[in-house]
Image: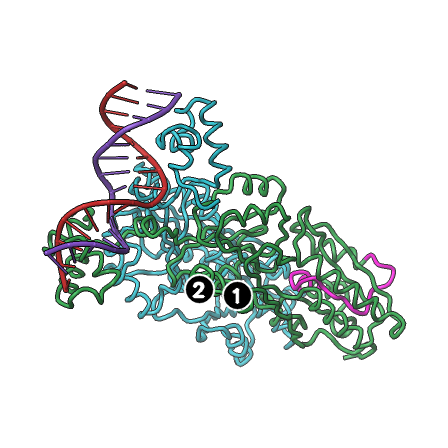
Chain colours: A cyan, B green, C red, D purple
Amino acid sequence: MGKADIHDVAKAADVSISTVSRAFTRPELVSAKTRRKVLEIADKLDFNISRSATALKSGQTYRVAMLMNEEITSWFNTQVFAGIESLMHPAGYDISLFQHIDTAQNRHEFFSELPIRRNVDAVFVASFAIDPHEVEQLQRLRVPVIGINTPSSDGFDATISIDDEKGMYKATQHLINLGHKHIVYPCSEAAETMDSSIDSRARGFIRACEDAQGKHDINWQVLSVPRGPAFADSALSALLNLDEFPDAICCQMDMMAIPLVLKLERYGHRTPRDYSIIGFDDSPYADTINLTTMRQDPYAMGRIAATKALKLINGEQLITPYEVVEAQLIPRSTDVPYGDVI
Amino acid sequence: MGKADIHDVAKAADVSISTVSRAFTRPELVSAKTRRKVLEIADKLDFNISRSATALKSGQTYRVAMLMNEEITSWFNTQVFAGIESLMHPAGYDISLFQHIDTAQNRHEFFSELPIRRNVDAVFVASFAIDPHEVEQLQRLRVPVIGINTPSSDGFDATISIDDEKGMYKATQHLINLGHKHIVYPCSEAAETMDSSIDSRARGFIRACEDAQGKHDINWQVLSVPRGPAFADSALSALLNLDEFPDAICCQMDMMAIPLVLKLERYGHRTPRDYSIIGFDDSPYADTINLTTMRQDPYAMGRIAATKALKLINGEQLITPYEVVEAQLIPRSTDVPYGDVI
DNA sequence: TTGAAAGCGTTACCAT
DNA sequence: ATGGTAACGCTTTCAA
């Protein structure tokens, strides 16, 4: 009872290998009786169509690449991955993951080696900036290249992005409209290779503050701390070291906001009693602590990206190859008009 | 400038296709000069060895399957996946994901269809119980089957598990030793198909309590709530509805403990002032809120599983095919001797 | 060191 | 409805 191949099945079923093949992939071309017999025998012999052979024959690889910043374990990456997987898997594709395409060294290695060349049917680039030369390298693969939250659409066949700048502009504006006078924006520094969203969000904050000058008399400040596992603690001490504690905190992301809310409380600063705070992402536990935040839906973005990829792989044209979605304000309970005391 | 194949490269480099092949996969068999020329031309023509063809020829698929409960987005699954990926990807394998192999319907579909038959070089089963018949189906694939946190090792070629029962026994014992008298164990119900860890942990709690009877005069209770997105809120209200609020809470997992700590505070119950609480997992934000918990490291378990798989694929024997690791108590600040007031 | 050729397991065209 | 056969792109003996 070793591994049976298509010939064994054909022989046992007394048909040709063509018929065996068709019984699996084009059942409608085979008589019901023959098909039943073939499938039954195949099952008995533990036979199944080989994806490698199908791939070779078809010229497709049934594999797509997903390039990402940092690790798959981050909330954003996991969500995007799950979204892509939810559509690509049923369509017969595996996802080949390339993590940490962010450090200079890894980028160089990846783009000069280009292991995916001739080995994927599409490429997803998740949430980081790639330079024109790198985009060009991807174009040479001659497969669809789909960007997810890439700062630019140049050279991509399709993109789906969240408007980070506008989202943060709205978040900031919300705090300003609440009457806050002293707004701090704690953020972890962008890596050597820009993480697009980090910079765009900061720009949104700054622009909102500048636009408000004159109309509102606000005192605003960007509090930049080194990236790394302790970024939230760094931001915490930077905040506590301020001459005057702000009345509003506008956070680059929930993973900054949540620890701040929790830890500031130990130092006597409670939201919304003492200050307002807004996050960005609506990631896990944002709801648990009632964090007002800007929601984005990376799972949905992954699905949109996969939809585009599937169409492009099929040779279809996209009506709207480049899409931008907006972050949505989720009002909860960490923001309150300036001066209000709960 | 279309897609060049191995013949084009061979022609351009004035060598045979054998030499082109060897230049990529057995460089030591090709003279330095020839190799350089071939690789240079290959690069110019955007050529690369096709993994599908290599796979077909070699008889391997360079693909492994990972079967899981629920979604890849859960903390445990993401960590295990990342651990497996960290070793399998560099070794040239893609991971084919099969999520939700938990409902009766999906299981039936998967195991009767068995799409991975002849299409993977190994199978990882992450954290759920599969019945003897299903294990047998997997064995018929004739590839290594590696279990991660499976309740039993029967039928598996290798397993790596955390001792959930012992871990929870230790957690409970810790609370008992602290002198607590009234201990509640809130947990979400196991699914129709057992999630192994859910049940083992409950057993550990119960056994620890029973073992303590006589020596300690404790009042313990399992508080079972329906699984689903609102399980933490369900547990919260069940706790608040108790005749008497417990002095210690032993949680099935951090995702139960964290919301409880946060939300109980709004109802006047603060840890460690009013009650002790211990979690399980050491998952995100456990450190942020200083939750005392039992740590497990699913990323490391994924790596161990991948190491075993790689060896088995290579035909090596495993010295210790079945490994069990223990959860480790991480003392932080949500536990305190009974009666202590902070 | 290099080349020729067989074969891996399919699919699809062309026959029947 | 079914069968024969070439071809997909590689790897690997065997020869030179």
Horizontal relation, residue B197 to residue A204: left or right: right
- Circles 1 and 2: CB distance less than 8 Å? yes
Q: Does residue A72 appear anywhere in the picture?
A: no
Please tell me in which quadrant of the rendered image residue A291 appears: bottom right
The amino acid type of the residue labelled 2 equals Ser
Q: Residue at x 84, y 71 (%)?
A: B212
Horizontal relation, residue B3 to residue A289: left or right: left
Count of marks overlaid on the render: 2
- Disc marking residue B299: 1
Q: Residue at x 28, y 66 (%)?
A: A108
Few, some or many residues within 10 Å of mark 1 (<14, 14–19, 20+): many
What is the C-alpha distance between the residues marked 1 and 2? 9 Å
Q: Does residue A180 appear anywhere in the picture?
A: yes
Question: Observer-nearest residue: B45 or A264?
Answer: B45
Q: Is residue B258 shown in magenta?
A: yes
Image location of residue B316, percent across then percent down: 46, 64
Image location of residue A148, percent across then percent down: 39, 53
Few, some or many residues within 10 Å of mark 2 (<14, 14–19, 20+): some
* Pointer 2 residue: B86
Q: Which residues are magenta?
A: B241-260
